[in-house]
Amino acid sequence: MSTTATPPRLDLRRIRHTDGWIFGTMLLSACLSLIASFVLATDAVVLAADPDAALTCNISSALSCGAVGVSSQASLFGFPNAFLGLVAEPVVITIAVAGLGGVRFPRWFMFSAQVVYTLGVVFAYWLFYQSMFHIGALCPWCLLVTLSTTLVFATLLHYNLRENNLFLTPRAHERALTFIRSGWDGVVVMAWVGAVVVAIILTYGADLLP
């Protein structure tokens, strides 16, 4: 009597808790953000020379890198905000590559990284809010930065909660582990991104089209 081996099932819930998934997602997101930051920095130089320059990402009245790029919010600290991404994302990429290689950073380092990146994601969404309700236009590359920043923040938080790098109490850490093991952190991220997409569509509608 012959027996046929049953192939192992692909358990996505288990995979997304592995270092490969966490740091791989972080690496991909940070690389996308770095590319977008480079394009935005280049556009900032072009706009500095000619504020009326026709950028390739000026798609419609609602999707316009030029309208956002010439606003005061685009250079909040006296230089283009994109330069911050050119500095920050290589650090995230280094952490992700090291994590994929099995490097374990000190607890204080990962805690500090979480604090700094939390400030970064707050800044990204502040800029998104400014674009939505004050500037009156959205920059496609900026939206990519917002999305990738969200994913880096989520994966970094997932790892730090798993490893208890945030100095939580034992009870709070156990609750955090239950939350991420159940997959609710992924649901929250998808719901958050979905809410952003819906908000954009409801706010601008047909103006998003060329």
Image (cartoon, grey):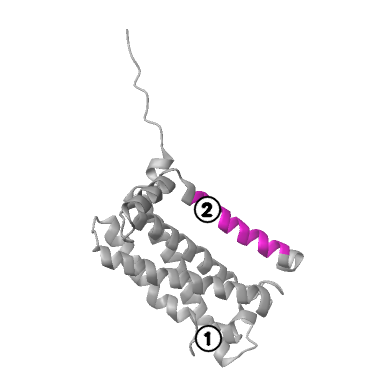
Lower sequence index among marks 2 and 1: 1
CA gap between label 2 and label 1 equals 31 Å
Tell me the SS state at disc 1. helix
> Which contiguous range is marked in magenta?
186-202
Tell me the SS state at disc 2. helix
The residue depicted at 41 percent of the width and 37 percent of the height is 11
Whether residue 22 is visible here, answered yes or no, is yes
- Up the image or down, 71 lies above or below 210; here it is below
Asked if the magenta segment contains residue 152, the reply would be: no
- Up the image or down, 107 lies above or below 184; here it is below
Task: Give the quadrant of the N terminus.
Answer: top left
User: Disc 1 marks which residue?
Assistant: 75
The residue depicted at 38 percent of the width and 69 percent of the height is 115
Mark 1 and mark 2 in contact (Cβ < 8 Å)? Answer: no
Disc 2 marks a residue whose amino acid type is Val
Residue at the extreme bottom of the image, as rendered: 49
Q: Quadrant of residue 192?
A: bottom right
Image coordinates of residue 15 in percent, x first then y, are 38, 44
Image coordinates of residue 68 in percent, x first then y, are 61, 80
Left/right of residue 62 with respect to residue 115 in the rendered view: right
User: Disc 2 marks which residue?
Assistant: 188
- Up the image or down, 44 lies above or below 146; here it is below
Disc 1 marks a residue whose amino acid type is Ser
Whether residue 56 is visible here, answered yes or no, is no
